[in-house]
Image: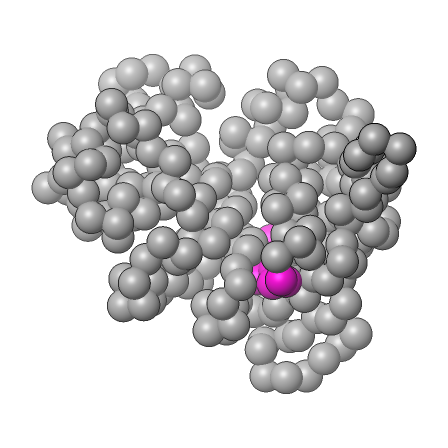
Amino acid sequence: MKKPIIQLRDVWKTYKMGEAEVHALRSVSLEVKEGEFVAIMGPSGSGKSTAVNMIGSLDIPTKGSIYLDGRDISKMSESDLAQLRGRKIGFIFQQFNLIPTLTALENVALPMVFQNIPKEQRIKRAEEILNIVELGDRMDHKPTELSGGQQQRVAIARSLANNPDVILADEPTGNLDSKTGETVMDFLEELNRKEGKTIIMVTHDIGVAKHAHRTEFLKDGQIVKSLKNNKGASKT
């Protein structure tokens, strides 16, 4: 049996808005095991962005517990958490979030700086990953010199820089045309199937969600439905 790599246990996230309290997440419990591909769907305002922050250990809950590789993140110092997050989770964003003044190679190498990996090793690793995503001939190009699909592949390469166990993808096809989006999804599927990467993907697109093993549906800060294998067999 594969062990859980991310666990949310009765997680609440509450924000103060003057005198009022806004519950962005309400008693969310979620377990993702090693090697799973999980999609999270929900309408605007459902709590998806907050869920991403929680799953990615970018924020701590108001109530409840979050475990990353068996460690309770609420009991860790920010510096220790940043190191664990940097090793365990690679992030892919809808807006790519590439640094415009850096080349593709430099963008991919950047996360390794924060893990204190020597420069020569960083460059070698970045070159290897860019070749894997078929951008070996674009290493010296800056983001403005790349198409949207190429920029997203650089972002995917960057997410793999520290060889993380988990890839957290936030609307990875949101700024891409359908054909390029399918190419990106095929690559994520390959990472999951061949490399054994755990993938957690937030999307509003049911067609994109079908690439996952299961889909968790959020509404008003709660998980209201879970579909396994996207075949319509609800288990909740």
Residue at x-position 63% and y-position 33%:
58
Residue lying farthest left? 137
Residue lying farthest front? 18
Query: In the image, which residues are magenta?
Result: 34-43
Residue at x-position 49% and y-position 67%:
205
Residue 9 visible somewhere in the drawing: no
Q: Is residue 42 magenta?
A: yes
Q: Is residue 158 magenta?
A: no
Q: Position of residue 65 (x, y in %)?
A: 82, 40
Q: Position of residue 171 (x, y in %)?
A: 47, 54
Residue 222 visible somewhere in the drawing: yes
- Quadrant where the C terminus sits is bottom right
Residue lying farthest bottom? 232
In the displayed structure, does residue 128 sit left or right of residue 4? Answer: left
Residue 121, image quadrant: top left
Q: Position of residue 180 (x, y in %)?
A: 27, 62
Q: Position of residue 46 (x, y in %)?
A: 69, 56
| Residue in the foreground of this view, choosing between 39 and 118 | 39
Residue 45, image quadrant: bottom right
Residue at x-position 76% and y-position 58%:
220
